[in-house]
Amino acid sequence: RRLRLPLREPLPAAVRGAALLEPGGGEAGASSEPAEGAVVWSRPSAELQSEGVAWEVSHVRSATSVSWHHRGDYLASVAPEGASRAVLLHQLSRRKSGSPFAKSKGRVEAVAFHPKKPWLCVATQRHVRIYDLASQELHKKLNPSAKWISSLSVHPGGDNLLLGSYDKRLCWFDLDLSASPYKTLRSHSLAIRSVAFHPRLPLFASASDDASVHVYHGRVYSDLMSNALIVPLKILKGHEIASHLGVMDIAWHPTQPWLFSAGADGSILLYTG
């Protein structure tokens, strides 16, 4: 139930989500005693500080994933059992945390910040909702026709979104085209655990409980009349299935065509070619 965080630089004023945040010890203007259910920021032990950990952020429910804003001062955490506080926004420079939602729209599985606009993409079990943090309104709702969403990733250009599901679907959305998937791929034999766009190159990947990682070429054109080009490239196999689980997460190198994968077998692999 703790996040361990380094310090980063501030977010632009265009994101008004800061108005939703409260100091780490409780509500703004309240006493120093944490309110019930409040997120608590605390200094870690000397041992953890020596390893580079700057803060620990305690949650009421266990957080399963985090998503950084591209400028680094904000991040969102997901605690699926947290009901209305399943999604929390955290600001490192001011050590504040808060929930952007007054009530739950369902069990939250994953979140992602839009790379160019003050939008937060929130995936529940069957839908993806895109919220405008500046106006604090729902911008768009996506319908993937999946039984249980597991993960999502936003293209660095901002107009496309990738979604994985436990029922083996990999969905590509063109946000300017439709609320339904532009393309649905079913190349994995078991549940998809993680999906990721490369931050600079026309690549994306999916990771599954079948212990494989599938890599694709995905090119987005500036011409609005041209649809995205999706081409399968490689199937990477290096993990072993452990307790019916395969590859749990993947992450691209920020500049190189290198892919990291973390498996239930306890190993982290780096693919470079």
Image (spheres, grey):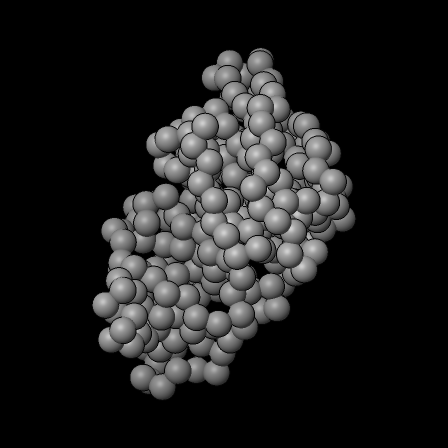
Q: Position of residue 242 (x, y in %)?
A: 64, 56
Residue closer to the observer: 88 or 68: 68
Q: Residue at x 24, y 75 (%)?
A: 46
Q: Is residue 42 left or right of residue 108?
A: left
How far from the left and from the top, in percent, is residue 156?
A: 44, 33
Image point 50% across, 17% down: which residue? 221
| Image vertical order of residue 1 relative to residue 273, above or below | below
Position of 65 compared to 142: left or right? left
Relative placement, left or right, of 208 versus 14 is: right
Residue 217 appearing in the image: yes
**Which residue corresponds to the image point at 63% horizontal and 45% vertical from the top-left?**
211
Q: In the image, is 167 to the left or to the right of 38?
A: right
Front residue (pair 204, 13): 204
The image quadrant of residue 98 is bottom left
- What is the number of callouts on the image? 0
Query: Which quadrant is the C terminus positioned in?
Result: top left
Residue 23 visible in the current orientation: no
Q: Nearer the viewer, residue 154 or 27?
A: 154
Residue 151 drawn at (x, y percent) = 59, 47
Q: Residue at x 56, y 42 (%)?
A: 238
Q: Position of residue 191 (x, y in %)?
A: 70, 47
